[in-house]
Amino acid sequence: MRRIAGFLLFFSLLAGGSPAFGYWVWSPKTGKWIDPRTQPKDTPSEQLQYARGVYEAKDHQKAVREFLRLVRHYPKSAEAPEAQFMVGQCYEAMDRPYLAFQMYKKLLEVYPYSARFKDAVSRSFAIGEAFSEGQKVRPLHPVPVAFPALDKAVEIFETIVAQAPYGEFGDQAQFRLGQTLQKLGNTGEALKVFERLVQEYPRSSWVEQARYRVALCAKQVSLKPSYDQEATDQAITWFEEFIASHPASELGDEARVSLQQLRTHKAESLFEVAGFYARQKKWLSSARYYRQIVDQYGDTPWAPQAVARLTEMGQQGYIHSDDAS
């Protein structure tokens, strides 16, 4: 008896006894029951026109659904890239820049030959710059806090470099990527990014600053507690090359200050090595390092001290005058 009652209830609902089933119709095309509310217009151009109307009415949440409906149902249509781009525009209007970037990124990956490709790169770059300069990203579900966005900026700049390396923003995205990595404290990776810019974009207007950043990153690495002499030598070479290549650069004074700091740092390191050999009573080795300071780093505060040590070692008979010169 219960089974019969269940069947009667089911058929009464299909017949319109409940508004929940009033939207479902049979589709001969798909051979399924469908909800017309979830279906696109008959053509992609009609769907795009309808979605644009919703967007212009500033109902951005609904516009997202309508533009995405076009992309899902007509992915190979001429209108699909435009709809994909407009989803990003909707999210920007809703102050959801990272979601907007994700929509632009999909356009770059799926529709690389569309008329909206350059626009998607441009908008992505603008979002990346905002994140790199300190804008924060709100999570998908609103909560009382926001999250720092430097990691998102890295993702965006990497996407532009990968998808449009030789476009309008390729070299600039490479430079901004290096800058953002520096802000994150990833100096070693930043150095590689700047080096890549110099190598791959030799005519770029960003090359001068990139060369300076290469030297600056090398300096930062060499001044860490775990530095090695090779890193310091390389940093000195890069600064010397930068100054020689760009004698009129606005960064020249800063470069010369950094170069002098590195030379002083290197002289100090050599002075410590010389002292170590002196404590081991290896006088000739000690004298060789003191002599190197005098010969190569005579413009540093360590040179007079090296001369004094050489004089003292000679007076005590640890080395001959020839060894000190």
Image (tube, rainbow, N blue to C red):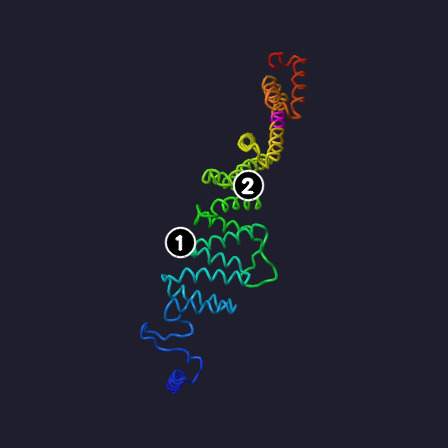
Query: Does residue 312 show up magenta in the picture?
Result: no
Helix, strand, or loop for circle 1? loop
Tags 1 and 2 touching, CB below 8 Å: no
At horizontal 42% and vertical 66% (from top left) the residue drawn is 48
Q: Quadrant of residue 96?
A: bottom right
Question: Which one is nearer the viewer's eye here, 167 or 260?
Answer: 167
Q: Tell me where the magenta segment starts and ends, as one range.
A: 267-272
Image coords of residue 183 (percent x, y): 58, 45
Please state the total of marks drawn on the protein image. Answer: 2
Question: Residue 75: x, y in percent?
Answer: 38, 62
Identify the residue shown where x is 47% and y is 53%.
121
Q: Is residue 26 left or right of residue 125?
A: left
Q: Eyeballing the image, is 5 above or below 95?
A: below
The quarter holding residue 105 reads bottom left
Secondary structure mostly seen in the magenta stretch: helix
Q: Secondary structure at mark 2?
A: helix
Within 10 Å of disc 2 (Cα), the crowding (few <14, some 14-19, many 20+) is many
Q: Position of residue 131 (x, y in %)?
A: 56, 52
Q: Which residue is mark 1?
A: 112
Spatial CA distance of label 1 from label 2 is: 32 Å
For the C terminus, the quadrant is: top right
Residue 270 covered by magenta stretch: yes
Image quarter for residue 311? Answer: top right
Residue that sits furthest to the front in the current view = 248
> Which numbered dot is residue 187?
2
User: What amino acid type is highlighted by mark number 2?
Assistant: Thr
Question: Is the N terminus in the top left, top right, bottom left or bottom right quadrant?
Answer: bottom left
Earlier residue among tags 1 and 2: 1
In percent of the image, x 44 and y 49: which residue is there?
164
Look at the picture and state if 296 lies above or below 193: above
Residue type pointed to by label 1 = Pro
